[in-house]
Image: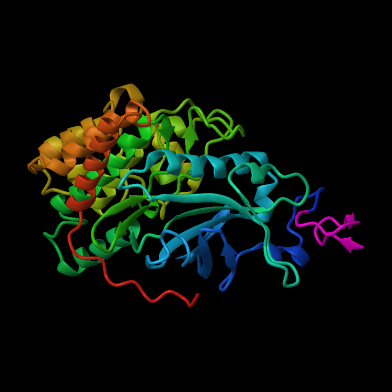
């Protein structure tokens, strides 16, 4: 008979999580987690885990490779790099966290935007036990299996690049080396290049009734060819989730990161896309000024959240004197405490900043707005709309590539 090391409850049967204190049981945890060399047969191909690349409160992310079945229709195609997000055992039994995980999968599946990390598949996986091959349960139905549930896994695009947080840090270091007179952050044109891709992703996200709720530089990837990818929809709020499991409402829970949260998110009020736009404005502010309006290094998480509600941000031109005067007015509007005083949508906000920077309009930026307009009509049900959407996505994909992607490292053997 096993005993829970945390609360000392006697466990008649081996379990992954203690039913009393919900602590992870060490005797079962390793067998339930993915690891380098883990192989998952998906029928159409085999997924092989290469390495663990990160971990958060809900799940752990691994780099993996998908090898297509050589006998299948895609058997001659090269291996595809994937990111696998596995829900942690201690989180999987908490309904609210489970709902967030399913929300993330559903949001990525619905979006299919060039600047959002691409959805591949949601499935559940039963680990190999004593050499017995793992069994697989495809789709959402397997996630509701009673008893010791299989581990839910979200497979998505692997983004080869750096976070925007890293990009900003490099530019700040370069600015300090350059001395006085240098821009404290990114050049205006480069910041707009990244920002327009983020705003395009948010325009499509909001058109589908999704609020991301965690816009910050560490959740924005810059691929090595210059394409921006918005990631981590883990606490996204879906107006009409289709998976049937209810995540906490904004009134019940205020997740997020204080330095980037909108006032209404801090206060647990009803959220819409304008909350994400407040956070996006802070990201743009940080790209240009080399720091967010309220510094995390100087204040506690609670103090940062209170600043978002009560304190005005430092005037932008006090940090970036090279900026045109109109930029101060735009940030005043974008960072207004009341949502109704901000920009109404991502495209309107982007157009205001683009014009203020004196940067010419481009077909790619116009395509971002058109993608959002098409997305508002729902999934394309006719060939004409589907073709239009495919063309717009291709315009965006091609326009933001500044250099060829480097050759990927060789995948592990089959």
Q: Residue at x 41, y 29 (%)?
A: 209
Q: Residue at x 55, y 28 (%)?
A: 251
Between 126 and 259, the one lying in front of the other is: 126
Between 63 and 130, the one lying in front of the other is: 130
Viewport quadrant of the N terminus: bottom right
Q: Position of residue 152 (x, y in %)?
A: 61, 51
99 displayed left or right of 405 = right
**Can you name the residue that lies furthest to the top here?**
340
Q: Is residue 44 above or below residue 91?
A: below
258 displayed left or right of 149 = left
Between 45 and 54, the one lying in front of the other is: 45
Q: Residue at x 50, y 75 (%)?
A: 414
Residue 135 visible in the displayed image: yes
Number of numbered tags placed on the structure image? 0
Q: Position of residue 293 (x, y in %)?
A: 31, 45
Q: Position of residue 190 (x, y in %)?
A: 17, 53
Q: Residue at x 41, y 53 (%)?
A: 298
The quadrant holding residue 38 is bottom right
Give the magenta-colored segment's residue range: 1-17
Answer whether residue 344 is magenta in the image. no
Q: Position of residue 301 (x, y in %)?
A: 49, 46
The chief SS type of the magenta part is loop
180 displayed left or right of 153 = left
Model colouring: rainbow
Residue 212 visible in the displayed image: no
């Amino acid at each position: 008979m096993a005993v829970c090391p945390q609360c000392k409850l006697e466990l008649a049967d081996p379990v992954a999580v203690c039913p009393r204190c919900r602590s992870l049981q060490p005797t079962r945890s390793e067998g339930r987690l993915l690891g380098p060399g883990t192989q998952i047969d998906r029928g159409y191909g085999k997924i092989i885990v290469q390495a663990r690349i990160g971990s958060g409160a809900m799940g752990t992310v691994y780099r993996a490779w998908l090898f297509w079945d050589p006998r299948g229709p895609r058997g001659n195609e090269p291996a595809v790099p994937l990111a696998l997000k596995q829900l942690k055992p201690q989180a999987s039994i908490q309904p609210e966290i489970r709902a967030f995980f399913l929300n993330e999968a559903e949001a990525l599946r619905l979006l299919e935007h060039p600047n959002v990390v691409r959805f591949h598949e949601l499935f559940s996986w039963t680990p190999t036990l004593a050499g017995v091959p793992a069994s697989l349960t495809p789709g959402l139905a397997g996630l509701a299996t009673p008893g010791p549930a299989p581990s839910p896994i979200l497979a998505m695009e692997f983004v080869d690049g750096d976070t925007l947080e890293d990009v900003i840090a490099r530019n700040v270091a370069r600015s300090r080396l350059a001395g006085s007179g240098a821009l404290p952050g990114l050049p205006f044109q480069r910041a707009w290049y990244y920002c327009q891709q983020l705003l395009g992703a948010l325009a499509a996200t909001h058109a589908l009734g999704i609020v991301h709720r965690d816009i910050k530089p560490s959740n924005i990837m810059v691929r090595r060819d210059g394409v921006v990818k918005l990631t981590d929809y883990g606490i996204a709020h879906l107006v009409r989730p289709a998976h049937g499991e209810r995540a906490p409402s904004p009134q019940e829970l205020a997740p997020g990161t204080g330095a980037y949260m909108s006032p209404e998110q801090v206060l647990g009020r009803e959220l819409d896309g304008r909350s994400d736009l407040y956070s996006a404005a802070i990201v743009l502010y940080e790209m240009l000024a080399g720091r967010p309006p309220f510094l995390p290094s100087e204040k506690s998480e609670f103090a940062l959240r209170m600043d978002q509600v009560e304190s005005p941000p430092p005037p932008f031109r006090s940090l970036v004197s090279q900026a045109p005067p109109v930029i101060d007015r735009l940030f005043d509007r974008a960072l207004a405490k009341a949502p109704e005083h901000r920009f109404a949508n991502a495209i309107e906000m982007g157009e205001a900043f683009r014009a203020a920077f004196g940067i010419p309009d481009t077909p790619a930026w116009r395509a971002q707005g058109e993608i959002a307009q098409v997305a508002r009509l729902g999934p394309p049900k006719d060939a004409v709309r589907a073709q239009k959407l495919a063309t717009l996505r291709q315009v965006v994909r091609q326009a933001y590539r500044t250099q060829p992607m480097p050759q990927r490292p060789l995948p592990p053997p089959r």
